[in-house]
Structure formats: structure tokens, C-alpha cells
Image: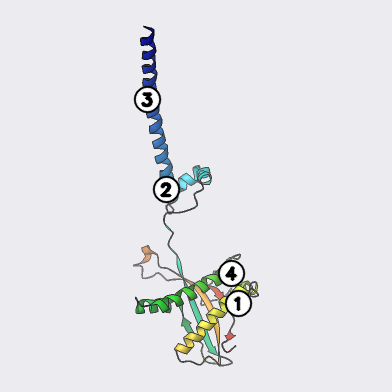
Amino acid sequence: MLIIKVRSKKIYSSGMKKPVYKILSYLCIAAFLVYWLIIFILIMPSNSVKQIISQHSPRFKNTFGIGWTLFTPPNTCNDRLYFIVRIINGHEKPDTIEVLENIALQKQAHAPFNQKENIIDHLVNNTVWNIKLIVWSNKKKPVVDVPGMSDSLYIVNAIAAVEGRQAYSAYRNTLINYCRIILQQKKLDAADKEVKIMITEKQIRPFKKMTDSNFLQKETLVFETPYTPLNT
């Protein structure tokens, strides 16, 4: 009888553990699903649920170190690079050469055999990006429409703060050299000319404004140099 009682006790104890393990398993699965659901919401672009979670549980993001997003937010503007070329001490109207958009068109025109255009695109766009990074990394960009240029002095001061840096001089000289190449392609003599470099940010038309005929793409000046002789 003693043996029978011991055995029945073991069976009873084992039977009690099974529901507990089953409940714990369900709780772990539920916690796992809730965790990844919250993660998925937090890495999505801005939405009302994300704002509610961020406001009520700010420690969640800090605790689990969420520093990435599932989708990169779309750009709101495109860079534009202009070479303003004029004759030194001349009175003629300067020529304006748009660069980046023309490079993109050349890549399309020569595809798929556009290796040369790809190299130029990479070089020039990287130079533009690096100039913006050097000049404006620690300063607020001026909000200036290209026609007005009312904050030109602000831009000049920002450039003056980094003008002595070797990297800035190298990037600026790269663009000046590319201007010489463009003039050579157009069969224009660069010996008696000088160039001003301008970088702007042109607003991208939002999807909801695609059919809006009244929408105007704002263009903001973010970088401008004084005229530099091309024969130096």
C-alpha cells in the first residue's frame, strides 16, 4: 500500500505541473508577439499609434535601444548645383549652367553603357554633399529663396569659418575643375572667365500635390561662393 500511495502522489504532482507549463508557454508567446508588434509600430513612419506608445512608454524605446526604421522617409528636396559663369570685368549677362539635373539626364540617355556618366555623377554629387556637410554641420541653414538671396552675408560668414580647411578647398576646386570641363565641352574659352558656385535645395512635389497646378516648388539657397577666375 505504501508503494501505491507514493506512485499516486507522483502522478498527481506531475499532473499539476502540466497546466502551469502550458500557461507559462502561452504567456511567453503572447509577450513575444506583443514585443514585436510594438517594435514594428515604432519602426514604421510617423503614425498616431506610434505617438501614443512613445508618449506613454518612453522607456521602452530607450531600454531596447530601437534606433532604426523599417522604411526610410522620402526626401523632401533635391540638390541643385549651378555654375554662374561671366567674363572677367565684362558687362554681359552671366551664363547659368545647371549641373546635377543635366548629369542625371546624361545617365539616362547613355544607359546602359553609362559608366562614365555614373562616375561623374558619383564624384560631383558626393562633392556637393560633402561641401554642405562641412559648411552647415554646426550651423542652421538659411531659409533663402534663390531670387532674393537676402541672407548672402550669412552664407559668406559660414563659408569663411571653414575656408581654411583643406577638405573644403579640395571640394571647391573639384567643382571649379568640373566647370572647366563643361566649358571645354561647350567649346568655350575659360581663360577670360570667372565662376560662382551655387548649391540649392529644390522642393520635391509631394504625392498629394501631383495634380495641383498651383503648387510651386520652392528653391532654397544653401551655399554660394564669390566669383573665382577660371584661369588660376
Between disc 1 and disc 4, the foreground one is: 1
Question: In the figure, 219 relative to 63: above or below?
Answer: below
- Of labels 1 and 4, earlier in sequence is 4
User: What colour scheme does the image use?
Assistant: rainbow
Q: What is the crowding at mark 2: few (fewer than 14 residues within 10 Å), some, or many (at least 20)?
A: some
Question: In the figure, 4 relative to 154: above or below?
Answer: above
Q: What is the crowding at mark 3: few (fewer than 14 residues within 10 Å), some, or many (at least 20)?
A: few
Between disc 2 and disc 3, the foreground one is: 3
Between disc 2 and disc 1, the foreground one is: 1
On the image, the x and y values in percent for residue 19 come to 37, 25
Viewed as shown, does residue 171 lie left or right of 10? Answer: right
Would you name the residue on which mark 4 appears?
A: 134
Viewed as shown, does residue 105 lie left or right of 166? Answer: left
Q: What is the crowding at mark 1: few (fewer than 14 residues within 10 Å), some, or many (at least 20)?
A: few
The answer to whether the residue labelled 1 contacts the one labelled 3, judged by CB atoms less than 8 Å apart, is: no
What's the residue type where badge 3 is placed? Lys
Between disc 3 and disc 4, the foreground one is: 3
Whole-angstrom CA distance, mark 1 to mark 4, is: 11 Å
Q: Please name the residue shown 45% across and 76% down the image.
A: 119
- Of labels 1 and 3, earlier in sequence is 3
Q: Give residue 138's quadrant in the image.
A: bottom right
Would you name the residue on which mark 2 appears?
A: 41
Whole-angstrom CA distance, mark 4 to mark 2, is: 35 Å
Whole-angstrom CA distance, mark 2 to mark 1, is: 45 Å
Q: Is residue 1 visible?
A: yes
What's the residue type where badge 2 is placed? Ile
Q: Which mark is residue 18?
A: 3
Quadrant in which the N terminus appears: top left
Q: Between 34 and 9, which is closer to the camera in this rendering?
A: 9
The answer to whether the residue labelled 2 contacts the one labelled 3, judged by CB atoms less than 8 Å apart, is: no
